[in-house]
Amino acid sequence: MQDGDGRSEKQKMLAGELYRAVGPEITADALRADRLLRAYNATGADEAARRGAILEELMGKVGAGVVLRPPFHCDYGYNISLGDGVFANFGCVFLDVVGIEIGDGCQIGPMVQILTADHPRDPELRRQGFESGKPVAVGRNVWIGGGAIILPGIRIGNDAIIGAGSVVTRDVPPGATVAGNPARALGRTG
């Protein structure tokens, strides 16, 4: 489905512009992700090779030694880049309408949500079904505590700590520890 400028809704989505989640490309990509996620989430702990193969097909990049405990949920998968040694515990949700980059050695607690999907503040645009995305980048060796929510457009620096249950509404500098709703600085990591 293309609009007057000839670009598809998927092209607008990937550019982080207003788009509608409709059309054959977006539908096919969502169905692909759904098929792969159902297969992944049905695997057992003794199926590491099968899990790895599914993740390689689903994700944009999967580094060496990645552990992503099911169940896991995402929109498309191909916008997610996981560095070497990333660990994500049970029940994580990564809404990846645009890029999510997770650096090497990150530890992600259970039920963490990393959200790139956003919606217009104008109610008329929301009624028309528009949405958009802002990429999220998480540096190396970041620890994100269970149940934390990382909002669209956030950048988290290397070695930062995000407290359990935090809602991260602002960028987090390297080495900072933040917690709360909204997340506020508590200090620096050792």
Image (spheres, rainbow, N blue to C red):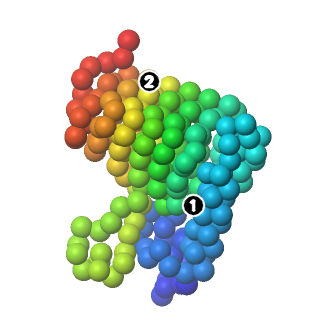
Q: Can residue 107 be seen in this view?
A: yes
Residue 7 shows in this picture? no
Q: In this view, does 14 lie to the left or right of 154?
A: right
Rendered residue at 61%/51% (across/down): 41
Q: How far apart are marks 1 and 2 (CA)?
A: 28 Å
Residue assigned mark 2: 159
Q: Please indicate whether residue 143 sits to the left or right of residue 8 in the image.
A: left
As drawn, 73 above or below 102: below
List x then y, in percent, for residue 142. 46, 28
Query: Residue drawn at (48%, 45%), measured in percent from left and top?
Result: 92
Residue 62 location, x and y as percent? 66, 42
Instruction: Give the quadrant of the C terminus.
Output: top left
Task: Tell me whether circle 1 and circle 2 mark residues in contact (CB < 8 Å).
Answer: no
Q: Name the element at disc 1.
A: loop
Give the labeled residue for mark 1: 76
Q: Which of marks 1 and 2 is in front?
A: 1
Residue positioned 67% across, 37% down in the render: 45
Q: Looking at the picture, how far across and down is residue 33, in whole percent?
A: 61, 62
Secondary structure of the residue carrying numbered label 2? loop
Q: In this view, does 66 lie above or below 56?
A: above
